[in-house]
Image: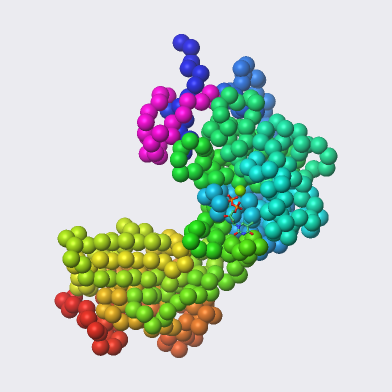
Amino acid sequence: MAKSKTQFICQNCGAVHNRWAGKCEGCGEWNTIVEEDPMGGIGGGPGKTPKKGRPVALYNLSGESEQAPRIHTHIAELDRALGGGFVRGSAVLIGGDPGIGKSTLLMQAAAALSRNKHRIVYVSGEEAVAQVRLRAQRLDAAETEVLLAAETNVEDILATLSEGKRPDLVIIDSIQTLWSDIVESAPGTVAQVRTGVQAMIRFAKQTGAAMVLVGHVTKEGQIAGPRVVEHMVDAVLYFEGDRGHHYRILRTVKNRFGPTDEIGVFEMSDKGLREVANPSELFLGERNAKAPGAAVFAGMEGTRPVLVEVQALVAATSLGTPRRAVIGWDSARLSMILAVLEAHCGVRLGQHDVYLNVAGGYRISEPAADLAVAAALVSSLAGLALPADCVYFGEISLSGAVRAVSQTAHRLKEADKLGFASAVLPSGSSDLPKASGGRWHEVEALADLVARIAGSKNALKPVEEDA
Ligand code: TYD
Ligand code: MG
């Protein structure tokens, strides 16, 4: 039986189906499945005639190993997210929403590296040379020796890169514009994007140049997103941020040469991205410490502590089903905290709308924020402001117990540095610093925290007692 030539590939997750369907079974997205010919591509797809295999050398795990040679950008936040700089011969994918600042960041990195006598080639497939020059002028990068090309054809790009001296770093902006003659599908499809990226990675491995690939996160399935090449590259960084706010976070999600869960924090200004060395100060910048419903959470991002303010508004409602709205946190987790407050602490919120917001447009993913969220909720309901110099962290279990979280010492040190003299934290934290003079208030159960807040002053609207 003749094998069918084409496959149906989801443009969102890359799942392969053998027939077209409206919805991808792999990721649940609609209208993302496109017919493609997978046989094309540089070295891609099975060859026409299988060649005879050749044995390769096998090695022991022990033995000589070199540190990955790195190119430091001296943009500390970028180097940190990369695990110490770009690695020669490796490929890094930088993903993010369109307009978030990927090209800006990379132009600044290119300029910084070029000033340190590295040979940088910037290939822009989205903007014309004149546009890129304009941006470079704005970023004070125009006087550097960054080499610029506006090209999208994979073969032409490779021919250009192979000419002359080997570049130290190549930036491809973006992978979705790459197209190769070998593949028949339209630019932006999974087959084209994968083929282009594969060719670029091969160039990096062969020449030892560091390769940076820019990928736009796509909401619609019409063009392939960066996810479809995540497995091929050595490191994946996502550039995130909220359009309404100026700060941007560069988050590492995969790194074969360094730690993941690191972040770099930047602020978008009219002269490009500025590094933010102390993100806590940024997130706590506009704080009104006297208002009820605000609690400061001492969180961690990788190795780095970050203090953010959690704001809650609890208001009586006349609706049958009260509203729950969350920004910057997980709504399922909020429901859980509300249920635990109700079941174990006698705090009734069934007749109240609950709004929760993480200040500055920041997103918290740690369960350690539970205690800060609960504190903000109870504070808002009781109409009592929490102490202005106190931070909160700890995970809450369904039984109402407060569980210890990691890196207590780090969190407390950052809090101390920013003038927070006290903390409410889980009891039994292993690395609790000793010489704290009783400023740490350990709580065993959520009910202890509720009692602390309700008992702090005469409550305007007392928490119901039946716990
Ligand atoms: P850009 O780097 O083009 O985004 P991406 O490559 O991720 O699509 O950034 C675009 C946005 O950044 C644009 O809306 C304008 C803004 N911006 C500034 O605010 N200041 C600057 O100095 C620059 C260069 C851009
Ligand atoms: Mg761009």
Residue 200 among magenta residues? no
Choose top left, top right, bottom left or bottom right for residue 441. bottom left
Residue 381 in view (yes/no): yes
Classify 386 as above or below 3.
below
Model colouring: rainbow
- The image shows residue 446 at horizontal and vertical percentages of 29, 73
Residue 24 among magenta residues? yes
Classify 365 as above or below 388.
above
Classify 386 as above or below 361.
below
Tell me the residue at 30%/75% (across/down).
Answer: 380
- The image shows residue 432 at horizontal and vertical percentages of 46, 77
Tell me the residue at 45%/77% (across/down).
Answer: 287
- The image shows residue 68 at horizontal and vertical percentages of 70, 52
Residue 407 in view (yes/no): no
- The image shows residue 398 at horizontal and vertical percentages of 27, 63
Residue 394 horizontal side relative to residue 210, left or right: left
